[in-house]
Image (tube, grey):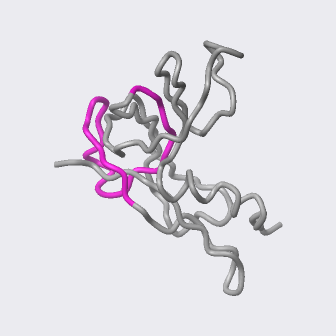
Amino acid sequence: MTYKSSVPLYWRLRKSKYNLIGTKCANCNSVFFPPRALCPNCRRRGKTENFRFSGKGKILTYTIIRAPPEGFERDAPYGVAIVRLDEGTNVTAQIVGDINKMEIGKRVSMVFRKIHEDGEDGLIRYGFKFQLIE
C-alpha cells in the first residue's frame, strides 16, 4: 500500500514545518514544539503565543535507519535524532550529511529540505531537517 499525504493536514501544519514555529507561554516562558494552544504548566493562567526557534541545537540521542519504511528507501541509510534546541525544547528530525560523524552532543542547525514525495504526480512535502555543524 502506497502512503499518501493528507493535503489539508499538511497545509494546516505548514507554518510550523516550514519555519520551525512553536509556541511560548507568556506567563512561564516555557517553549513548545509542535505548537500548543494551552501551556501544560500554567493551564488557564498561561497565554501561548507563536515563537520562532533559532534552529540551532545539539543531538541528545540518535539512530541510523538502515531498513526504512515504504517510500523512504532512496534515503537509506539515514540518521534520525532527538535534537535539544537552544531554546530548551526537543525535536525529532532527520539528520542530513555524513551519518558516520553523528555523535551525542554534536551541534546541528536546521535546514529546509524535501521530506517525501507521493509518487510522480503526488504531493511533495518539504520541511525541516538538521545538518551537522563541523
Q: Which quadrant would the N terminus be assigned to in this image?
A: bottom right
Who's the residue at 65% across and 66% down the image? 71
In the image, is 120 to the left or to the right of 132?
Answer: right
- Looking at this view, is 55 or 68 the one in front? 55
Q: Nearer the viewer, residue 21 or 121?
A: 21
**108 part of magenta stretch:** yes
Image coordinates of residue 6 in percent, x first then y, are 78, 63
How many marks the image carries: the answer is 0
Q: Give residue 78's position: percent from left, percent from top.
A: 44, 54
Q: Is residue 85 magenta?
A: no
Indicate the position of residue 117 as horizontal and vertical percent values. 63, 73
In percent of the image, x 61 and y 26: which residue is there?
47
From the viewer's perspective, is residue 74 above or below residue 86?
below
Does 7 appear above or below 61?
below
Q: Which residues are magenta?
A: 88-111
Relative to 18, residue 29 above or below: above
In the picture provided, is 14 more to the left or to the right than 89?
right
Question: What residue is rendered at 54% in x and 31% in y?
Answer: 32
